[in-house]
Image: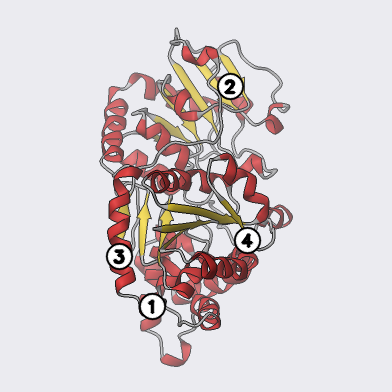
């Protein structure tokens, strides 16, 4: 088969998609990865074949000028209207969803997709993929797949706020009078569908099926969608394991990592790093803090029990640790869980709080609001993780659930079957000859 992956240029998203691309390639399938031109080097550094499409546009520059660009809620977490995935049904209104979709189509979804659509469709028409796997907000992938009759799927690596929000939207839309059934997503994606010879279908929003890296115990899913589980494979890009990390630590080792995305785009951490370092300075532990160089200059002192590094391969670090303190990004959370480690999360952005709540519910860790938590709070939480055996047991159970999901190599025959089923049922595919 020919498989086309596509995503807008977000490094952490790409790193979570790359292992499945490798698995399909090593199984003998042809694989290409399409993104904006500036992302080409990131793709090729992972050993994958890049297809530059469209023009470069940086959503993070817009966010730097106006942090409220995506309509994030005051309490942090998911942006509107996708935060309905965390709300009771009776709090979800048609007005909130329809207005929220109108906002996000214009600001977020068009910004991320319009620069890529034309070139991506042109490449798909030339290369003729059998399957398109797209990052859950890279709707350009769904448009291109429908244009050429390819099977297509979202690759999900977070709470399915998009599928859940869409489910609520369609439920409330059906209750509205016909004249009031506005649908910003259908209007936008439908225009592209007609341009390329098809019609709007819900698959343009949520895919024909969804490959899901998030175990069901942490996930929020839409009832009407098909989810195909996939185990997360930790990958952080090219890295080197330093000699000191190969030796067994003499004291309990704790990792502190706050992610790649925020500082990689010129932002700053949501938590007081110096306060945390000071608060645990007298503990008989070795704290390994991976702190971006752009943030290291803010530290006025580094305690004797702390090692500060700009970057380390997290999976190699976690293998030597007794606990991890982190921001609840899915890649970090999953890597920690796969090592069976208790975790103290400090989530704020996007689906981090929801994922962290899932970790707490499984008994694998604790969560704190980074805007409110003090260094002393973190210290007390860490001492609990290291001393109370229930957290280790909960972490072991979460690891078992993670490992129960198929590895990328095991998913290949499942995808082959799904492609055959969807291609056989596609009118567009039958017309391809």
Question: Along the line of sight, which residue is nearer the eye, 366 or 160?
Answer: 160
Residue 347 relative to residue 20: left or right: right
Question: Along the line of sight, which residue is nearer the eye, 180 or 36?
Answer: 36
Give SS at disc 1.
helix
Mark 4 — residue?
53
Q: Earlier in the sequence, mark 3 or mark 1?
A: 1
Which of the two discs, 3 and 1, sits closer to the camera? Answer: 3
Asked whether disc 3 touches disc 2, contact meaning CB atoms under 8 Å apart, the reply is: no
Say few, some or many: other residues with alpha carbon within 10 Å of mark 4 (under 14 / 14 to 19 / 20 or more): many
How far across and how far down the image is residue 347, in percent? 50, 42
Question: Along the line of sight, which residue is nearer the eye, 112 or 416?
Answer: 416
Q: Earlier in the sequence, mark 1 or mark 4?
A: 4
Say few, some or many: other residues with alpha carbon within 10 Å of mark 3 (under 14 / 14 to 19 / 20 or more): few
Asked whether disc 1 touches disc 2, contact meaning CB atoms under 8 Å apart, the reply is: no
Q: Is residue 162 visible?
A: yes
Question: If the image is split into quadrants, where does the N terminus sit?
Answer: bottom left
Mark 2 — residue?
277
Asked whether disc 3 touches disc 1, contact meaning CB atoms under 8 Å apart, the reply is: no
- C-alpha span from label 3 to label 1: 34 Å
Above or below 90: residue 200: below
Which of the two discs, 3 and 2, sits closer to the camera? Answer: 3
Mark 1 — residue?
172
Q: Earlier in the sequence, mark 3 or mark 4?
A: 4
């Amino acid at each position: 088969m020919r498989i086309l992956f596509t995503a807008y240029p977000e490094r952490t998203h790409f790193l979570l998609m790359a292992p499945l691309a490798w698995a399909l390639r090593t199984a003998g399938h042809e694989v290409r990865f399409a993104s904006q031109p500036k992302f080409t080097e990131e793709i090729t550094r992972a050993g994958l074949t890049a297809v530059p499409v469209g023009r470069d546009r940086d959503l993070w520059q817009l966010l730097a000028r106006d942090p409220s660009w995506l309509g994030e809620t005051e309490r942090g977490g998911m942006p509107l209207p996708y935060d309905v995935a965390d709300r009771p049904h009776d709090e979800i209104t048609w007005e909130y969803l329809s207005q929220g979709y109108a906002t996000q189509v214009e600001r977020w979804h068009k910004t991320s997709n319009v620069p890529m659509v034309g070139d991506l469709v042109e490449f798909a028409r030339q290369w003729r993929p059998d399957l398109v796997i797209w990052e859950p907000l890279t709707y350009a992938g769904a448009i291109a797949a429908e244009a050429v009759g390819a099977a297509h799927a979202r690759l999900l690596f977070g709470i399915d706020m998009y599928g859940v929000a869409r489910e609520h939207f369609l439920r409330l839309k059906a209750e509205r009078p016909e004249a009031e059934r506005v649908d910003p997503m259908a209007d936008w994606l439908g225009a592209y569908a007609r341009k390329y010879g098809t019609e709007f279908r819900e698959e343009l929003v949520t895919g024909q099926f969804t490959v899901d890296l998030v175990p069901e115990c942490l996930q929020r899913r839409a009832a009407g969608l098909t989810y195909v589980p996939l185990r997360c494979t930790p990958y952080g890009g090219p890295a080197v394991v330093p000699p000191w990390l190969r030796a067994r630590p003499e004291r309990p080792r704790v990792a502190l990592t706050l992610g790649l995305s925020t500082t990689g785009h010129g932002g700053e951490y949501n938590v007081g790093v110096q306060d945390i370092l000071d608060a645990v300075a007298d503990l008989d532990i070795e704290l390994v803090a991976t702190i971006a160089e752009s943030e290291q200059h803010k530290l006025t002192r580094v305690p004797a029990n702390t090692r500060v590094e700009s970057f380390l391969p997290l999976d190699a670090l976690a293998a030597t640790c007794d606990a991890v303190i982190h921001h609840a990004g899915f890649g970090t959370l999953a890597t920690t869980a796969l090592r069976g480690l208790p975790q103290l999360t400090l989530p704020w952005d996007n689906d981090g709080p929801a994922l962290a709540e899932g970790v707490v519910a499984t008994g694998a860790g604790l969560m704190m609001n980074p805007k409110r938590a003090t260094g002393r709070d973190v210290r007390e939480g860490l001492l609990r993780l290291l001393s109370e055996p229930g957290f280790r047991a909960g972490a072991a159970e979460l690891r078992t659930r993670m490992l129960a999901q198929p590895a990328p190599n095991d998913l290949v025959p499942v995808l082959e079957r799904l492609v055959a089923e969807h291609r056989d049922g596609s009118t567009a595919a039958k017309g391809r000859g």
